[in-house]
């Protein structure tokens, strides 16, 4: 269950990858933009204003996240509730943008092909996805889930070079594919738990009964603190993949 307040506890830290992704986009006149998995819409608005876009559409399947989006909307900035997997549009876009959402959508080869089909002949694609499953913060959640007989939540990312091959195959003449480590100096180790509660653990919260989720959290906390030790501050590393291409 996405909770905007929990997600926004690390707003400043989470913003940098968005800024880096936006910097890859080449502003062109009168762009028509779609932001898939737009969340609260605050960054969608920033993107819309930065590009001076003609029209921007934000799509998200979380009602709670979108409830906040209303206040960021405007005449040419709209929000729509829906699944990325089911999204279709009658008119093409000059930019398909997605920040920190597609890691949870399966079958990236098909997905990228579908997103590419939404583009105009000179369109751009720009995607940022967390790739942190190998960090103890994520592997501990998967291990506790498996122990409790719950399907672990893993990202659907492909090997990095595969994205470069895919963009090439899909006809992008210029491309940029990179992985970047974002280092976050958190107050202490326990802050890692608050961080993942805002993202990865929302999925376990959605799938488990409240009592079962409380048990999950207890085991997760004990295991994580034992593995990482109690430090203040704690330097949390977060791997992310950034993709960009244009025809
Ligand atoms: C980590 S948040 C990122 C929000 C925003 N892009 C940002 O950078 O602040 C991920 C968002 O993707 C949305 N999301 C995840 N899977 C989705 C799907 N299959 N279809 C539509 N939205 C999805 C979630 O509801 C959530 O708001």
Image: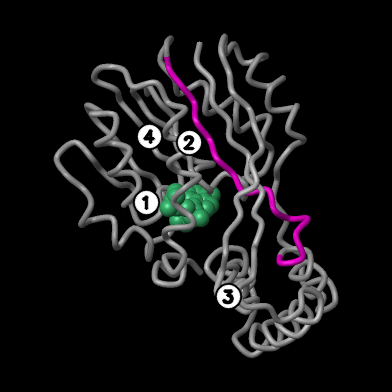
- Residues under numbered marks 4 and 3 in contact, where contact means CB atoms less than 8 Å apart: no
Q: Earlier in the sequence, mark 3 or mark 1?
A: 1
Task: Please indicate, yes or no, whether residue 61 appears anywhere in the rendered image.
Answer: no
Give the numbered dot on residue 21.
2
For marks 2 and 1, give the one nearer the viewer.
Answer: 2
Q: Nearer the viewer, residue 233 or 167?
A: 233
Q: Secondary structure at mark 2?
A: helix
Q: Position of residue 98 (x, y in %)?
A: 48, 39
Q: Residue at coordinates 37% horizontally, 66% vertically from top-left?
A: 64
Task: Please indicate, yes or no, whether residue 121 appears anywhere in the rendered image.
Answer: yes
Ligand 1 has an atom within 8 Å of the beta carbon of the residue at disc 2: no
**Label 1 sits on residue:** 81
* Left or right: residue 154 compared with residue 20: right
Q: Secondary structure at mark 3?
A: helix
Calculate the distance from the C-alpha at mark 2 to the C-alpha at mark 3: 25 Å
**Label 3 sits on residue:** 191
Magenta residues, start to end: 123-137
Ligand 1 has an atom within 8 Å of the beta carbon of the residue at disc 1: no
Q: Earlier in the sequence, mark 2 or mark 4?
A: 2
**Label 4 sits on residue:** 34
Q: Secondary structure at mark 4?
A: strand
């Amino acid at each position: 269950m996405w909770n905007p307040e929990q997600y926004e506890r690390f707003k400043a830290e989470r913003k940098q990858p968005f800024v880096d992704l936006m910097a890859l986009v080449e502003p062109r006149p009168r762009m028509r933009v779609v932001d898939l998995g737009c969340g609260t819409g605050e960054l969608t608005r920033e993107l819309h204003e930065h590009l001076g876009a003609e029209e921007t559409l934000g799509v998200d399947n979380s009602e709670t996240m979108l409830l906040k989006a209303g206040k960021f909307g405007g005449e040419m900035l709209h929000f729509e509730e829906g699944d990325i997997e089911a999204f279709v549009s009658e008119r093409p876009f000059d930019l398909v943008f997605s920040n920190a959402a597609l890691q949870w959508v399966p079958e990236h080869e098909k997905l990228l092909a579908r997103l590419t089909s939404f583009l105009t002949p000179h369109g751009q694609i720009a995607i940022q996805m967390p790739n942190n499953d190998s960090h103890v913060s994520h592997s501990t959640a998967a291990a506790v889930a498996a122990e409790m007989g719950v399907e672990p939540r893993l990202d659907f990312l492909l090997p990095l070079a595969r994205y470069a091959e895919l963009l090439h195959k899909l006809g992008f003449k210029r491309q940029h594919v990179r992985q970047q480590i974002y280092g976050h100096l958190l107050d202490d180790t326990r802050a890692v738990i608050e961080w993942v509660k805002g993202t990865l653990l929302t999925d376990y919260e959605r799938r488990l009964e409240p009592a079962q989720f409380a048990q999950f959290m207890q085991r997760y906390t004990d295991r994580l603190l034992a593995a990482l030790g109690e430090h203040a501050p704690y330097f949390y590393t977060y791997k992310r993949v950034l993709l960009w291409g244009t025809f």
